[in-house]
């Protein structure tokens, strides 16, 4: 009669406790998944129904679940995750050897294992410390638990920590843990998952995951990634040439004007173009000097051509020569200055000779 009454009280207390935590868990149902939540509550309910303490202690279980609920809220915030892990450790210490204390210790190990998994590929040294703390917690739970479900969860946690270490010795320990799970918890989904892990651990050759994992230098890779992320922009902006000292930098060029091309590095100065001087020596002139010399040579050539017909016309018709002379002097000043005697002498002497010849004839 007394045992039936005690069992009834336990069931009522469990119903009240689960009702409260279900209400708290509703906001996270989509995040952690209905199946995972049901399994978690099933484990907690199983643990409470098998307690030897008689009436369920709401305060201890509520404290464990509240911290677990908080762990779902922190997301990727490392600081808050550390605070949650420390809270589980505190509950484990405060509650002694009770089942809530063991579950708090187990969740503390899980927090460290999760942290180690996140750091394994970026900060292996920190991950190693987290793995050691996780193994210590899982071992404590395994040694103290009198429930198969809690022992199995501790064994699984240790096996995953050993796999993360990825040494031959640690992988052998992981396989041993999975094999023990098959003995303690046979004919379950957990046992099927353990068998799959064992098959994966049997493949440790060159084509296996762990052979690759052991050969990776994650410390060097993490340093390389950090260096790449901190690399400066080298003072450049896409689409802009910030070399202000170069004359052809482009920043201070006038609109439509380009940089002065250099010989041999621009299509303007191709090997097929002979830009040497008349004597075949010297480097190609700059565009500015090249244009001035070309203009001077053209003016001189035009002046020479104009001078030849002018002298012939002057002999035939002095009047025409005298009328054309001002035009030639006004349009071509440079040639008239160079040869003044050659142009003025015929104009002054020829009329005198003609008049002298006329006087003799008369």
Image: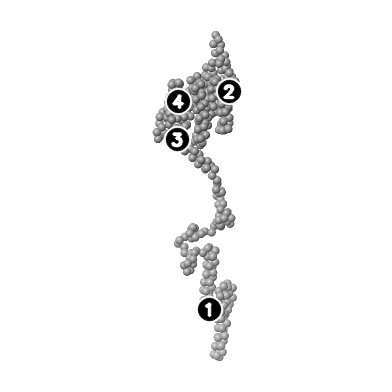
Name the residue nearer the viewer: 82 or 258.
Answer: 82
Looking at the image, is mark 2 or mark 3 nearer the viewer?
2
- Which quadrant would residue 183 be assigned to in this image? top left
Q: Which residue sits at x=53%, y=72%?
A: 300
Name the residue nearer the viewer: 305 or 81.
Answer: 81
Looking at the image, is mark 2 or mark 4 nearer the viewer?
2
Mark 3 secondary-structure assignment? helix
On the rendered image, what quadrant is the C terminus found in?
bottom right
Name the residue nearer the viewer: 272 or 69.
Answer: 69
Dot 3 alpha-carbon crowd within 10 angstroms: few under 14, some 14 to 19, many 20 or more: some
Tag of residue 213: 3
Q: Which residue is mark 1?
A: 311
Residue 29 screen position, x and y as percent = 55, 26
Q: Which residue is mark 2?
A: 94
Disc 2 versus disc 3: distance between alpha carbons?
39 Å
Disc 2 versus disc 4: distance between alpha carbons?
29 Å
Q: Which residue is mark 4?
A: 177
Looking at the image, is mark 2 or mark 1 nearer the viewer?
2
Disc 4 versus disc 3: distance between alpha carbons?
21 Å
Dot 2 alpha-carbon crowd within 10 angstroms: few under 14, some 14 to 19, many 20 or more: few
Q: Are marks 4 and 1 in contact (CB under 8 Å)?
A: no
Q: Earlier in the sequence, mark 4 or mark 3?
A: 4
Disc 1 versus disc 3: distance between alpha carbons?
101 Å
């Amino acid at each position: 009669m007394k045992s039936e009454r005690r069992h009834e009280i336990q069931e009522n207390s469990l119903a009240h406790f689960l009702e409260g935590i279900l209400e708290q868990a509703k906001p996270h149902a989509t995040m952690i998944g209905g199946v995972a939540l049901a399994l978690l509550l099933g484990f907690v309910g199983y643990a409470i129904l098998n307690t030897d303490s008689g009436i369920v202690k709401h305060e201890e279980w509520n404290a464990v679940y509240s911290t677990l609920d908080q762990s779902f809220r922190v997301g990727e915030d490392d600081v808050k995750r550390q605070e949650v892990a420390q809270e589980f450790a505190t509950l484990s210490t405060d509650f002694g050897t009770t089942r809530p204390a063991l579950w708090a210790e187990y969740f503390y190990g899980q927090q460290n294992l999760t942290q180690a998994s996140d750091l394994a590929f970026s900060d292996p040294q920190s991950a190693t410390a987290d793995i050691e703390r996780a193994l210590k917690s899982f071992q404590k739970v395994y040694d103290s638990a009198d429930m198969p479900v809690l022992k199995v969860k501790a064994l699984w946690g240790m096996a995953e920590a050993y796999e993360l270490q990825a040494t031959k010795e640690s992988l052998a320990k992981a396989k041993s843990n999975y094999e023990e799970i098959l003995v303690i918890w046979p004919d379950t989904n957990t046992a099927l998952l353990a068998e799959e892990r064992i098959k994966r651990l049997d493949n440790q050759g060159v084509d296996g995951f762990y052979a690759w994992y052991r050969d990776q230098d994650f410390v060097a890779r993490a340093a390389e990634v950090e260096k790449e992320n901190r690399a400066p922009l080298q003072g450049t902006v896409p689409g802009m040439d910030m070399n202000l000292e170069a004359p052809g930098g482009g920043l201070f060029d006038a609109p439509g004007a380009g940089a002065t091309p250099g010989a041999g590095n621009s299509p303007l100065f191709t090997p097929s173009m002979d830009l040497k001087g008349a004597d075949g020596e010297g480097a190609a002139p700059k565009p500015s000097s090249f244009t001035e010399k070309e203009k001077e040579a053209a003016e001189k050539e035009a002046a020479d051509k104009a001078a030849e017909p002018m002298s012939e016309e002057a002999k035939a018709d002095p009047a025409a020569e005298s009328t054309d002379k001002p035009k030639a002097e006004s349009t071509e000043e440079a040639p008239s200055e160079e040869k003044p005697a050659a142009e003025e002498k015929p104009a002054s002497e020829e009329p005198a000779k003609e008049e002298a010849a006329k006087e003799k004839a008369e």
